[in-house]
Image: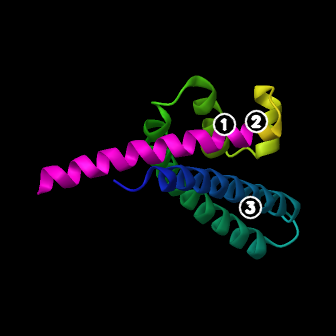
Amino acid sequence: MKSCISALEMARSAELTIRAELDHIEEMRSIATQTKYANNDYSAAVIKKLELLERELNTSIDIAVDRKREALEVISGLDEMQRLILYRYYILGEEWETVADKVYVSLRQVYNIRKKALNELKLKYEEVQDSCIKEAI
């Protein structure tokens, strides 16, 4: 098992990747509809590119689901506020300021709760890793 922190970071990265791919697909759709009647060859190329991007998006979504599942397992043992804050940032891909607004606490409190939660996860992960090493010996 990879570290708990990297599981969270990979889930966030997957979410942000999907958002970027969706934005790109929307731009391509806009181009395809604007050039629909202007140049058939160009429209066909744009549509082909759009189909490729949509296949790539589906692959990214599959990866994101797996990474988010791992991240959810990692944060499942935390208290409610810690879990909520890490969920909003790492799983939903929100910025820290948005997280603070949504959970009705100050940005400083969000940072403090995050720090405490990540420290708890590191300790928990180290204990699990130590017990796995002892079992292997």
Is 121 covered by the magenta stretch? yes
According to the picture, the residue beneath numbered tag 1 turns out to be: 113
Direction from residue 8 to residue 124 in the image, left or right: left
Secondary structure at numbered mark 3: helix
For the residue marked with disc 1, what is the amino acid? Ile
According to the picture, the residue beneath numbered tag 3 turns out to be: 24
Q: Position of residue 27 (x, y in %)?
A: 80, 60
Q: Position of residue 89 (x, y in %)?
A: 67, 43
Magenta residues?
110-137
Direction from residue 69 to residue 131 in the image, left or right: left
Q: CA distance from mark 2 to mark 1?
A: 6 Å
According to the picture, the residue beneath numbered tag 2 turns out to be: 109
Query: What crowding class fits label 2: few (fewer than 14 Cα within 10 Å), some (14-19), or many (20 or more)?
Result: few
Give the total number of marks visible in the rendering.
3
Q: Marks 3 and 2: in contact by CB < 8 Å? A: no
The relative height of residue 37 versus residue 117 in the rendered view (above or below) is: below
The relative height of residue 94 versus residue 134 in the rendered view (above or below) is: above
Q: Marks 1 and 3: in contact by CB < 8 Å? A: no
Residue at image point 88% right, 61% down: 34
Direction from residue 131 to residue 68 in the image, left or right: right
Residue at image point 60% right, 57% down: 13
User: Which of the two residues, 49 or 66, is positioned nearer the viewer here?
Assistant: 66
The relative height of residue 103 versus residue 73 in the rendered view (above or below) is: above
